[in-house]
Image (tube, rainbow, N blue to C red):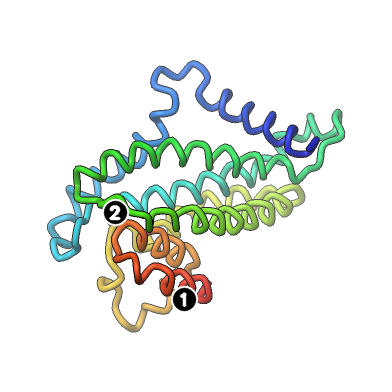
Amino acid sequence: MQFLNQLYALSKRNVILRYKHSLIGFLWGFIKPLIYLLIFIVIFSAQFSSVKNYVLYATSGILVWFFFSNIVSQGVQSIIQASGIIKSVKLPVLLFPLAEVATELFNLALALMVYFVVMHWFGMVYSIQLIWLIPILFIFSIFSFSIAIFLAALNVYFRDIGILWNTIQPAIFYLTPIAYTEALIPERFSFVIKLNPIYYFIKLFRYPCTMPQHLIHTCFLSVSASV
């Protein structure tokens, strides 16, 4: 119970610090993906006119990517930034990257509220299959936390890790089918996409939003096994 109270306090602190003195506060969690979506629509929508509901396709990928990206980016630096607190107060080091996960889950929950409302106007159908998003995000949170805690531990001893992540992060973004489809990748390079675990999670997240309900369970098991 004490661990959960400490986690809650740190997560609340992160949210307050992030939006302190901000005019629009939590809306930034949706505005940033929206900006990317507008760019993708201008550049790619004509090329992917065959994609059923491209807006829904791109937005779902963007939300998942920023969730992962923010957890890892903040998590990598979390232990270093909290070094003063760690030295003065006996707190489990694991709390700090975990608090970043909790913070991003809160931000994602707010973004999804807007997402579900806005995407309804673009053809998204509300159904019981959306419940699958809960276990999908739970598994993805564990994955993201694992990456964050691993890099955060290395970053304590090698500060180049944080710099390296910021350098390769854009490359990972463009190597993930977010704004484009898998069909765009030449067959000889398809293995590069399949080696990217983010690809599977984004694909998994898209299923409940776009696929018939009777296919969800099968896809959930098959994609999870692939990861």
Residue farthest toward the bottom in the current orientation of the protein: 188
Q: Mark 1 vs mark 2: give the one in front.
A: 1
- Image check: 59 left or right of 26? left
Q: Amino acid at mark 2?
A: Ala
Q: Residues within 10 Å of mark 1 (few under 14, many from 20)?
A: few
How many callouts does the rendering have? 2
Residue for point 32% across, 53% down: 127
Q: Amino acid at mark 1?
A: Ser
Position of residue 199 relative to residue 70, above or below, is: below
Residue for point 70% across, 36% down: 7
- Image check: 125 left or right of 144? left
Dot 1 and dot 2 residues touching (CB under 8 Å): no
CA gap, disc 1 and disc 2: 22 Å
Q: Quadrant of residue 142?
A: bottom right
* Residue under label 2: 58
Q: Earlier in the sequence, mark 1 or mark 2?
A: 2
